[in-house]
Image: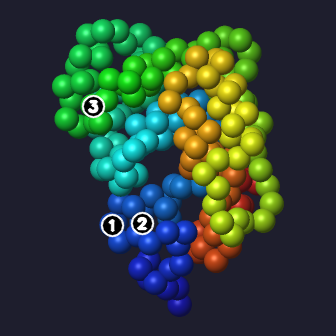
Amino acid sequence: MSSSPTERVRCWPASDPLYVAYHDEEWGRPVRDERGLYERFCLEGFQSGLSWLTILRKREGFRRAFAGFEPEAVACFGDRDVARLLADAAIVRHRGKIEAAIANARAVLALREAGTPLEELVWEYRRDGPAPYEWAAETPESSELSRRLKAAGFRFVGPTTVYSSLQACGVVNDHRPDCWVRDDVERERHA
């Protein structure tokens, strides 16, 4: 007999159903497509200084506001779009983060054109191995990837934001050893 969702061991305490679902169904599961990675990097950037639950609650608003995080569409955003987004209560209204999301879409396209798509660059930093007993806010690898992303034109991609993105996208499996999802995530990463 399986335990109920509230009895399961998770990586962090969660009682909000949205947060529980994010942990159980999404966090750490591999994201290997350009659009999905671009979305996660943007959302992690918007989260900076806020709770992740705030971002989850606004996620659908972000998707509507940012054209489903299609890099081609967002790369075409201009000043009118920035003004529209600054007035949109369905998202986090922070000029620097909004402008970063647009710059990041352009950088995604530039990477692709240069022959190193975002998914190839990010997955170069795949880490396999034992589950952590303590999480790090950043690693030498996230610092290196942060430098490479910034050199490609990305913004709001410091080492901590990059490491959070690597965790969220399954590039590293940082589910705790006793987390009920860890083994499923590891199987998905090796599929």
- Please name the amino acid that badge 1 sits on: Asp
Q: Residues within 10 Å of mark 1 (few under 14, many from 20)?
A: few
Q: CA distance from mark 1 to mark 2?
A: 6 Å
- Please name the amino acid that badge 3 sits on: Arg
**Mark 1 and mark 3 residues within 8 Å of each other at the beta carbon:** no
- The residue at the point 64 percent across, 25 percent down is 149
Name the front one of labels 1 and 3: 3
Mark 3 lies on a secondary structure that is loop
Residue 180: x and y, percent? 59, 74
The numbered mark at residue 20 is: 2
Whether 156 is drawn above or below 133: the answer is: above
Whether 30 is drawn above or below 125: the answer is: below
**143 or 168: which is nearer to us?**
143
In this figure, which residue is indicated by the disc labeled 3? 93
Which image quadrant is residue 14 in?
bottom left
- The residue at the point 56 percent across, 22 percent down is 154
Q: Residues within 10 Å of mark 3 (few under 14, many from 20)?
A: some
Mark with earlier residue (2, 3): 2
In the image, is 140 to the left or to the right of 179? right
Of all residues shown, which one is farthest toward the right?
A: 129
The numbered mark at residue 16 is: 1
Q: Residues within 10 Å of mark 2 (few under 14, many from 20)?
A: some
- The residue at the point 40 percent across, 52 percent down is 52
